[in-house]
C-alpha cells in the first residue's frame, strides 16, 4: 500500500472502543434506517442551492431504469455526471469500435430535465484500453502513434457529444501520490511523456471549443498534492493551454480532512485563476486506513453495519456533511457540487477500499429515503446562498 496516500490513519484501538460504545447505544436506539429526516417534499437540493451553484450526482443507466430513483434524481439534482458511461473502457472496445448507447441515454435524460452534463472522463489510466498507448507486446507505443490514438479517441468522443456536455474532465488522476514525484506513472506518460496532459486539453478544446475543460483528482485540497496541482495549472497556462477549472473529487472521511484544509485548498486553487468544482463528494463513515480514491489500494476490514448505520453515526455523518458544504460555499470560485452516487446502495464505497461490505456514505438510504445528512446539506445550501 502506498505510504504516501496515508493522509489520515484511523486509530484502530479508538475505533474498537467507538464501536463498543455504539453497540451499547444501539441497544437503546433504533438503527439509522429509522432516523431519516422528515423533509417537506418541496425542499430539494437544487432549490436550496438556487443560483449559487449547481448541485448534481453521478448517474448510471441502471439508475434511470428504476422509475422511483429516476424521479428522485430529476427532483433533487440540477446537473448530472455519467458515472461510468463515458469512461474509455465503456465507450470503445479492444478493436476500437465505439458504442455510445449508454452514454446517450444519460445525456438524453439530462436534456429532458434541463440538467447540464459533466463528462467524466477522457483520459484515466485505470480504465484506458491498452491499444491507445501500448502495443500487443505490452511495450509503450512510439510517441507519434500514441498521440494519434489519443487525438482520434478524444475527437470521436467530444465530437459525438458536442454541444451536449457542459464540461469535460479531460484528465483524471494524473498526479503522483508519491513524495518527490510529480506525475503518476501511467501508460500515457510512458508512451508520450508529460506532454500527454497538454495534448489532451488541446485536442478536447479543438473538438468542442464551447465546453469547459477541467482537471480532476483526489486529495488535491491537501498540501502535498495541492502543490502539484498548482504546478500543473501553471505549466498548462505557461504553454498557452486553456484549463477552465479543477475538480476536487471530495472522497472524504468523517474526520478527515478538516474543513479548514478544504477551504484553504479551494482558495489556493482559485488563486491560480480557475474555477473549482467538488466533483465526487461522499463521506465514508466506516473504518479504513487511507483517504483518497486510489483504485489500486485494497484493504481488509470488518462489515460493522450491514443492517443500517446507528443513530449516533447518522448524526455524525449529518454534521460532517453540513460542515463540508458550509466550508465549500464560503468560496465563490466553487461552481458545482456533485455527489458520487444517488443512494447508499449505489455507492462505489460498498466495494472500496474493502470489498463487499455495506456502506452508508450518501444522503439517501437504500430505499431512497432521506437521511439526516440531506437536511444538513439543504440547510447549509440555503445559508450559503
Image (cartoon, grey):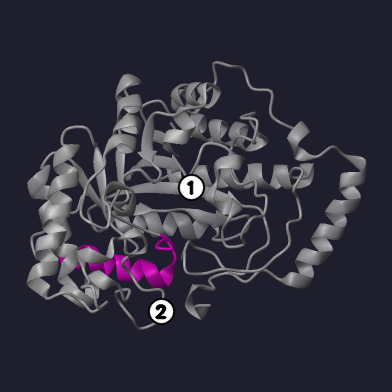
Q: Reading the chain from its start, which is encountered first: label 1 or label 2?
A: 2
Residue displayed at 34% across by 52% down: 247
On screen, 375 above or below 27? above
**The magenta segment:** 218-236
Find disc 1 in the rendering and name its residue: 281
Assign a secondary structure to mark 1. Answer: strand
Assign a secondary structure to mark 2. Answer: loop
Within-10-Å neighbours for mark 2: few <14, some 14–19, many 20+: some
Magenta run includes residue 111:
no
Q: Quadrant of residue 130?
A: bottom left
Residue displayed at 43% across by 38% down: 60
Q: Position of residue 214 (x, y in %)?
A: 25, 51
Q: Position of residue 195 (x, y in %)?
A: 15, 70
On screen, 41 above or below 131? above
How many marks do you count on the picture?
2
Q: Can residue 193 be seen by looking at this rendering?
A: no
Within-10-Å neighbours for mark 1: few <14, some 14–19, many 20+: many
Find disc 2 in the rendering and name its residue: 178
Magenta run includes residue 222:
yes
Q: Quadrant of residue 30?
A: top right
- Residues 179 and 50: in front is 179
Main secondary structure of the magenta stretch: helix
Q: Position of residue 56 (x, y in %)?
A: 42, 35
**Horizontal arrangement in the rendering, residue 194 relative to residue 50 (left or right):** left
CA–CA distance in space, label 1 to label 2: 23 Å
On screen, 66 above or below 326? above
**Horizontal arrangement in the rendering, residue 289 relative to residue 313 (left or right):** left
Residue displayed at 65% across by 49% down: 359
**Horizontal arrangement in the rendering, residue 39 relative to residue 94 (left or right):** right
**Horizontal arrangement in the rendering, residue 18 relative to residue 357 (left or right):** right
Asked if labels 2 and 1 touch by Cβ distance under 8 angstroms, the answer is: no
- Residues 243 and 70: in front is 70
Amino acid at each position: 500500500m502506498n505510504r504516501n496516500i496515508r493522509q489520515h490513519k484511523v486509530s484502530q484501538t479508538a475505533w474498537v472502543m467507538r464501536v463498543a460504545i455504539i453497540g451499547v447505544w444501539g441497544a437503546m436506539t433504533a438503527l439509522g434506517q429509522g432516523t431519516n429526516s422528515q423533509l417537506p417534499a418541496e425542499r430539494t437540493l437544487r432549490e436550496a442551492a438556487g443560483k449559487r451553484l449547481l448541485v448534481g450526482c453521478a448517474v448510471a443507466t441502471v439508475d434511470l431504469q428504476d422509475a422511483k430513483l429516476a424521479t428522485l434524481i430529476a427532483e433533487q439534482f440540477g446537473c448530472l455526471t455519467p458515472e461510468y458511461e463515458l469512461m474509455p473502457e465503456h465507450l470503445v472496445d479492444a478493436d476500437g469500435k465505439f458504442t455510445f448507447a449508454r452514454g446517450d441515454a444519460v445525456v438524453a435524460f439530462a436534456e429532458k430535465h434541463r440538467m447540464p452534463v459533466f463528462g467524466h472522463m477522457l483520459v484515466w489510466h485505470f480504465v484506458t484500453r491498452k491499444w491507445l498507448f501500448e502495443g500487443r507486446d505490452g511495450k509503450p507505443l512510439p510517441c507519434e502513434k500514441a498521440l494519434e490514438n489519443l487525438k482520434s479517441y478524444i475527437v470521436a468522443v467530444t465530437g459525438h457529444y458536442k454541444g451536449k456536455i457542459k464540461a469535460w474532465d479531460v484528465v483524471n488522476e494524473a498526479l503522483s501520490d508519491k513524495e518527490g514525484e510529480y506525475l503518476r506513472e501511467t501508460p500515457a506518460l510512458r508512451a508520450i511523456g508529460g506532454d500527454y496532459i497538454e495534448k489532451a486539453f488541446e485536442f478536447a478544446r479543438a473538438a468542442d471549443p464551447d465546453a469547459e475543460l477541467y482537471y480532476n483528482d483526489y486529495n488535491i485540497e491537501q498540501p502535498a498534492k495541492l502543490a502539484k496541482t498548482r504546478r500543473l495549472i501553471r505549466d498548462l497556462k505557461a504553454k498557452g493551454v486553456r484549463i477552465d477549472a479543477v475538480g476536487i473529487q471530495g472522497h472524504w472521511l468523517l474526520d478527515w480532512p478538516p474543513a479548514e484544509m478544504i477551504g484553504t485548498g479551494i482558495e489556493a486553487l482559485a488563486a491560480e485563476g480557475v474555477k473549482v468544482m467538488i466533483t465526487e463528494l461522499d463521506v465514508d463513515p466506516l473504518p479504513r486506513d487511507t483517504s483518497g480514491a486510489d483504485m489500486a489500494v485494497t484493504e481488509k476490514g470488518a462489515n460493522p453495519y450491514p443492517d443500517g448505520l446507528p443513530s449516533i453515526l447518522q448524526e455524525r455523518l449529518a454534521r460532517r456533511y453540513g460542515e463540508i458544504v458550509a466550508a465549500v460555499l464560503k468560496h465563490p470560485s466553487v461552481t458545482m457540487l456533485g455527489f458520487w452516487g444517488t443512494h447508499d446502495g449505489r455507492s462505489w464505497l460498498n466495494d472500496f477500499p474493502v470489498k463487499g461490505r455495506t456502506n452508508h456514505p450518501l444522503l439517501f438510504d437504500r430505499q431512497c429515503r432521506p437521511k439526516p445528512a440531506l437536511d444538513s446539506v439543504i440547510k447549509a445550501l440555503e445559508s450559503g446562498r
